[in-house]
Amino acid sequence: MEFDLLVALPELLPSAIAWAELQSRRVTEEGDPLGESDQSMAGEVGVRRPELIRVMLVDRIPMPDNSFLKRAAIETDLLGPHTAGLTLGHSILIVKEAMNLRILSHECRHVYQYERYGSIRAFLPIYLRQIATVGYADAPLELDARAHER
């Protein structure tokens, strides 16, 4: 049976938000701040507080422990072996081998989007609803991030 993210969203959102906030705190504590030129680039793509961004380079993007959340992430193609970057608030995870200006600028645009919505708790329901209704490739927030890649 195919996974229906739109149907699952009400049940999934509390776990997704909790997982995202936990990952964000970890990156805030362990990640590195952007250098001067990357802070400048972040400002150019709209980030208001680039000094708050922390980046953590990882071997792979972490998966949720919660089996329902993990299934949703995999079946909707949000997280998996192909995922190069993930932004959660001012926290950015990027796969080491994928790190480049295009990925970083894309993720910085997502930081701007989080700033615009005010929090992970406010952003994720909108983002996930877009993924559920039009798919990852056509989600307006993804189209916007791709339009700001360098």
Image: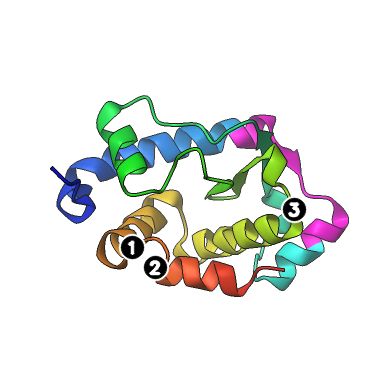
Q: Nearer the viewer, residue 120 or 86?
A: 86
Circle 2 residues within 10 Å: few <14, some 14–19, many ≥20: some
The quadrant of the picture occupied by the N terminus is top left
| Residue 90 location (% of width, % of height) | 60, 50
Q: What amino acid is at disc 2?
A: Ala
- Residue contact between numbered discs 2 and 1, judged by CB atoms under 8 Å: yes
How many angstroms separate mark 1 from mark 3 (CA)?
25 Å
Circle 1 residues within 10 Å: few <14, some 14–19, many ≥20: some
The quadrant of the picture occupied by the C terminus is bottom right
Q: How many marks?
A: 3
- Reading the image, the residue beneath label 3 is 100
Q: Relative to 57, say whether 121 is above or below.
A: below
Q: Residue at x 38, y 53 (%)?
A: 124
Residue 28: in magenta span: yes
Q: State which region is magenta.
A: 27-39
- Reading the image, the residue beneath label 1 is 135
